Every structure is written in C-alpha cells, then in structure tokens.
Image (cartoon, rainbow, N blue to C red):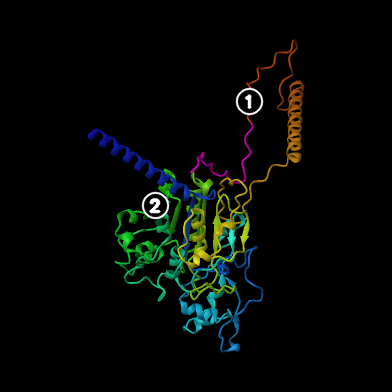
Amino acid sequence: MMRRLTIGLAFVAALSAVSTAGAASAAQARHAPRTPIRHLIVLMQENHTYDNYFGTYKRGDGLPRRTCMPRNLTDAGAGCVKPFAIRNRPVRDLGHTADVFRAQYNEGRMNGFVDAFRRLGVDGSLAMGHYDGQDLPFYWNLADRFVLFDRFFSSAAGGSTWNHMFAVTGTPGNPKVDAVPAKGFGNLPMIFDRLQAAGVSWKFYVQNYDPRITYRSRVSTDRGSQIVWVPPLDYARYIDNRALFSHIVDLSQYYKDLNAGKLPEVSYIAPSGSSEHPPGSIQAGERFVRTLLNSLMSSTYWTHSAFIWSYDDWGGWYDHVKPPKVDKFGYGFRVPALLVSPYARAGFTDHTTLDFTSILKFIEQNWNLKPLAARDARASSIRGAFDFSRGPREPAIVPAVRGVKPPAAPQRSIVYPAYVVAFLLTALLIVMASRRSSGSWRRGPGPGGPPDRPEGPTPPPPPSPPRAKFRPQPVPSETPPLPEFPSRRSA
C-alpha cells in the first residue's frame, strides 16, 4: 500500500514539474521578440530642442527662413532676435518649467520664446541660439547614416520628472506637480513590472550611481537628481526588494555585461555629468554617447540590437513646430531623437509624430506586453524607423568629425606610366655614367688625370658587390585603417 502511495506521489510530482516547465516554456515563447531586435537600449539626455541641435541640418523640418522672435510682446519697437550660431558662447540653464512653457507657447502663437524670460527679468536672446555640424559632428554623422526623428516631442509640457515618468509609466506620475512625491509613486506600474512578470531581462544603468540616494534619502547635490532620472528609485517595492533593486546598477556594468555576454533584453541608461544639460558640455555628451555606441558595435550584440536616445525636455530653447495637444499634460516642444541599429533605415528622417511613450509602445509590441496607460496604448511606435526586409548592416565606427571620407584609390592610368618613365630615366643615367667612366679610363694623361693604360691584355674588371634585392615599400594610406571587429556569435 505504502509503495503504491509513494509511486503515485512521485507520478503527481513529475506531472507537476512537466506542467510547470511547459508553462514556463509557453510564457517564454509568448514573450519572445517579434522582430530581429533582441536587445533595446534607451538613453535619455537633457534639455535641448530639435531646432537647437538640428535646425540647420540638410534634412528634416528645421529653422524657417526669416524667423525673428519678438523681444517684448507688449512693445513692438523693442525689435526681435533671429536664430544665431552659438559656437563658443557661454550658455546657461534657461529655465524649463510649466510656466515657462506656457509663456513661450503663448496659446499656440509660438512667439514667446524670448519674451518669457524678459518677464522673469533676464535677457532671453540665448533661447534663439543653435548648434550645427561644427559643434555636433558625431550626432550629425549619425543622422547621415541612421535615423533622425524630426517629429519627436517631449511627452509633457513641463520639466524632467513628468517626462521621465511618461518614459517608463505612460503617465506623468504625479499629476499635481512636476516633482517626485514625498512618499514616492506607490503602486503605479512601470514598464519594468511588465518585463519582470514576462521573464524579459532588464537593467537600469546609472552613471555615477549612488544606491544610497532614493526618494527616502534625498540630497541637494547633483547626484540627488538620480531620483528623477531613475524612477525605480522612487518605489518602495523596488528599494525594499533585493532582487528588484539589483537591476539598478552603475554604468560601468554596461561595459562588463557587453564583454561577458550578459546584456539584458531591455536596458535603460541614465547619465550624470555627461547629460548635456546646460551649462554642461555638449561635446562631453557626444563623447559619452560615442563610447556607448562604439562599445555596442564592437560587441557580439550589434547584429540584434537597437540604441535610441532623446532629451527629457526642451530646456527653454526655441523650436518652431507647434506641439499637438493630446491631453492636459502634453505634448511638449520637439526634442532631438536618433535611432542607431543594424536594422535602422539608412540616412532616414522619420516624420512620424512620436513621444517617449512611442518607445514604450515598441517594447510592448516587440515583447508582447500589455500597455501601461492610455497614452502608450494610443501612441505611434518607433517601429517604422526599422527596415526588417533586409539583413543587418555590418558595424562601422562613425567618425567624430564631419567630412571624413575613405582614402581615394590610386589612379593607375597615371601611376603606372610614371613608374615606366622613372625606370627609363634611371637606366639612361646608368648608361651615361658607365660611358663616362669608360672614357676617362682610356684618356691620355692630362693635368691631374690618370696615367695611360699600359700595353698588353686588358685586365679583368674588379668584382661587383652583391646587388641588394628590391623590396617594394607599401604606399601609406591617407588615414589609418578602422579597427577590426571581433568575430561575432548570435546574441
């Protein structure tokens, strides 16, 4: 009897194990990527508009001609400010609150970009400044080769907190004020909850990460902003759960994961000193992004990856495109956004109306996840920026300067005749030297000359030294070759 019971229990346990394994396998298949993109990396930089970075770029909806922004909307005689190249002028943090947005938007007239700061008692001329390919050569080179979005809007007509929350929850998070609530964001779902439940791997990489700084332990230093840039740090259930908290790591882990074959399927990156937030260096931001991208391109993950980055809000800078009104929170003004991937359309400007929730939409589409909120459910996806009808492009290091071209091939119709002429001239000189030497040997004595050759048989010539073998030297290239990429396996 006991033996039969033991056998029965073992059979039930085996069936349960098989059932559990089958369910896990089915869940894994249900959330497997639906496109060749198996690894998505999302970066959020800070505080620039499309016109501020790409207003003079050759493609896309850039700065209109004859633009001139009134200095004072109540005094027509105060004149106006035209867009100008910033170059090496010092910049400052202009201000990017909801009040500044409303003053610049001016009920849809889009004419208050300078006057908004006059009302605050400061000169707003800087808002009309812009950069170009001399200042941002790497970003412009990426736009030439991959995808630039010229209808990408910030999700909220406000500052950082609302927009970072839209990027991971599809909502402003705190509908009352653009700030992290004293008690955090409670049970509001994030995209990381969806990924965790579906068994899709994820991490949040943070530059200069300090795990001691959360919504419970705020500080007033620059590092204190990480609770805005890294929303999981504002959730008790993530801070108190060691397993969930371990998904938030320092940025140095990104490079280790690339080398060790441990890059998760979905990665978010938060910058710190390299965020391009004025008055910070935009060149430092370019170097930061370039390092992230080059590391990805030289890894085994490139073939199935996508890297997209944007800017959390407009930063007070001018942009001429009136943002659509989708709800009481947004959209805000346009922000720069680019996509780099072996499947990104080559040299393509995407005119689709998008915002941060469009990235959420792609994650939900690609890994078969439920929408988080009404905004991401209705959003257009970034999927149209990919071309999956072709195979992946090979990686290529994008130059950090404009105008770099591969070295020109030699013009053989000119080079080879030159070799022939040089050979003939050399032969002619040898013959002439030989004749001159022979003539002086037979010449009679003269002042300072050699004696006459004696009578009798001609002595044999002295032995010639051994001739060195000719070894052609390689022609140097105009530019050094690109570094070779390691052989890659599927990731």
Viewer-side residue, 141 vs 370: 370
Whether residue 351 is in magenta: the answer is: no
| Numbered disc in front, either 2 or 1 | 2
Mark 2–mark 1 CB contact (< 8 Å): no
Amino acid type for the residue under numbered disc 1: Lys
Element marked by disc 1:
loop
Task: Identify the residue at image location x=50%, y=59%.
Answer: 286
Task: Identify the residue at image location x=58%, y=74%.
Answer: 322
Residue 138 seen by the camera: no
Q: Earlier in the sequence, mark 2 or mark 1?
A: 2
Viewer-side residue, 426 vs 117: 117
Q: Which residues are magenta?
A: 472-491
Q: Position of residue 188 (x, y in %)?
A: 38, 66
Question: Badge 2 is on which residue?
Answer: 252
Q: Is 8 placed above or below 364 here?
A: above
Would residue 419 appear left or right of 257 to someone viewing this image? right
Viewer-side residue, 124 vs 206: 206
Question: Badge 1 is on which residue?
Answer: 469
Using the numbered discs, state the Cα–Cα distance from disc 2 to disc 1 in whole angstroms: 54 Å
Q: Is 98 placed above or below 72 here?
A: above
Residue 121 seen by the camera: yes
Q: Is 423 placed above or below 189 here?
A: above
**How many numbered marks appear?**
2
Q: Position of residue 179 (x, y in %)?
A: 39, 72
Viewer-side residue, 433 vs 11: 11
Question: Predominant secondary structure in magenta?
Answer: loop
Task: Identify the residue at image location x=34%, y=39%.
Answer: 14
Would residue 422 appear left or right of 286 to someone viewing this image? right
Label drawn at residue 21: none
Q: Position of residue 91 (x, y in %)?
A: 49, 71
